[in-house]
Image (cartoon, helix red, strand yellow):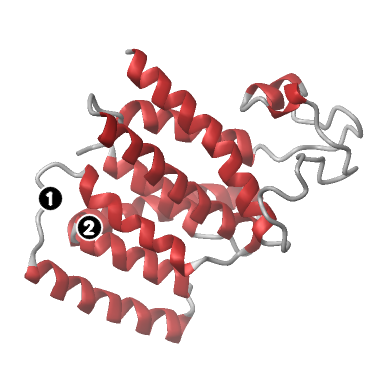
Amino acid sequence: MFAKSFVTILTICFASFTTLAAQRSGVGQSPWSPPRSYCDHCHHPLTWWQLVPILGWVIQGGHCHFCRQRITAYDPLCELIGGFFAWRLAGPGLFHSLLVVLVIQILIFIASCDYFHQYLYPLSLVGLLLLPLLIPGWGFSLTGVVTALAMTGLLTITAARWYWLGGGDVLFIAILLLTFGVEATALVILLASLLTLIAFFHSQQKRLPFLPALCLATLIILSTY
């Protein structure tokens, strides 16, 4: 119980930093400069209690303490989701638990880059190659690789012809095909599409990023193994 609690708290704290890094990367800033977080509206440096994951947002009522402008719920939602799946996926071994923390942070970073700036660092996808280490009994299959390449080719043609998917979406799905196989990847895509559809009716935006939904659906399917 203590180990799970520690991994959960660690994941939540890192998730706060990861979303910050993703937001700053899109505006040419580093995660460490400027050294203190600030309000996106009034640019007032935040105090320590405002930076407490999840609770800082709740205490402020979703609005900046200084200028009263609305604060997006995306950050605390990522922290909450990351903590939930850390608790769900953490195992008794230290290596497995730390791997869970790392994979969740990678997924949060990918989702946040697409959510805030509609782009993807291709290098961040390399971290997804760690996914098989979290799947019990996973083994390399030449047939699976050939199938994944064939499906990726079809998805690339679809993306180029009808613009249903972006290049980042195709790369992400290609890695899932290598990791989960066709059936589980199809479930990820179906679930992500459903999540995006729900978000579409809620927000009424004409175009929504797909990677956040893919990342969340990946965690959901991963937790079923």
Q: Residues within 10 Å of mark 1 (few under 14, many from 20)?
A: few
Looking at the picture, how far across and down is residue 69, in whole percent? 86, 37
Which residue is most to the top?
Answer: 1
> Are discs 2 and 1 less than 8 Å apart at CB?
yes
The kind of residue tagged 2 is Thr
Q: Secondary structure at mark 2?
A: helix
Looking at the picture, how far across and down is residue 138, in whole percent? 12, 50
Q: Is residue 33 above or below residue 67?
A: below
Q: Is residue 12 above or below residue 126?
A: above
Looking at the picture, how far across and down is residue 65, in whole percent? 85, 27
Q: Quadrant of the N terminus?
A: top left
Q: Is residue 38 left or right of residue 158?
A: right
Q: Which residue is mark 1?
A: 138
Residue appearing at x 32%, y 53% in the figure: 188
Q: Is residue 176 visible?
A: yes
Residue appearing at x 12%, y 67% in the figure: 144
Residue 165 position by quadrant: bottom left
Q: Is residue 166 above or below residue 18?
A: below
Q: Is residue 194 visible?
A: no
| Residue in the foreground of this view, choosing between 16 and 54 | 16
Q: Secondary structure at mark 1?
A: loop
Looking at the picture, how far across and down is residue 96, in whole percent? 26, 35
Q: Which residue is mark 2?
A: 179
Q: CA distance from mark 2 to mark 1?
A: 8 Å
Q: Is residue 109 left or right of residue 117?
A: left
Q: Residues within 10 Å of mark 2 (few under 14, many from 20)?
A: many
